[in-house]
Amino acid sequence: MAFLWMIIVGGIVGAVAKLIMPGRDPGGIIVTIILGILGGVVGGYLFGLIGLGDGGLTGLIGAILGAILLLWIYRMVVGRRADVP
């Protein structure tokens, strides 16, 4: 059940990550939200492993940081590929 909750919150976190990191994404808002879900799951899980993710505020912060990290990596990888002629 906690995993399902992280996925739902991850969708919201993806939108928050998009607000924190404005700009054009090579995949649009749907890709940004999917990356937010994945980042939320990864960030929440990693914060849980180090003892910070109790499902409260620290878990939410971990999810937001994970989503921002994945969004940044995605922009770097896809942006470079789009720049190559």
Image: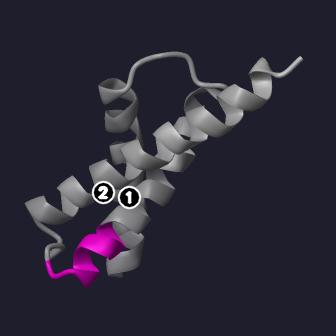
Determine whether, in the image, residue 2 is placed left or right of residue 71. left
Residue at the extreme right: 85
| Sequence-earlier tag: 1 or 2 | 1
Question: Which residue bears the numbered disc 1?
Answer: 40
Q: Is residue 69 above or below residue 76?
A: below
Locate residue 26: give its quadrant: top right
Q: Horizontal and vertical percent for residue 76?
A: 59, 34
Label 1: which secondary element: helix
Question: Which residue is at 35% across, 66% downward?
Answer: 6
Q: Horizontal and vertical percent for residue 12?
A: 35, 44
Quadrant of the frame with the C terminus: top right
**Is residue 47 on the magenta stretch?**
yes
Q: Are marks 1 and 2 in contact (CB under 8 Å)?
A: yes
**Is residue 68 on the magenta stretch?**
no
Locate residue 19: give its quadrant: top left
Classified by dominant secondary structure, the portion drawn in magenta counts as helix
Q: Horizontal and vertical percent for residue 36?
A: 45, 48
Magenta highlight range = 44-51
Q: Is residue 76 above or below residue 23?
A: below
Determine whether, in the image, residue 32 is placed left or right of residue 65. right
The circle drawn on residue 74 is none
Question: Which residue bears the numbered disc 2?
Answer: 63
Q: What's the residue type where badge 1 is placed? A: Gly
Quadrant of the frame with the N terminus: bottom left
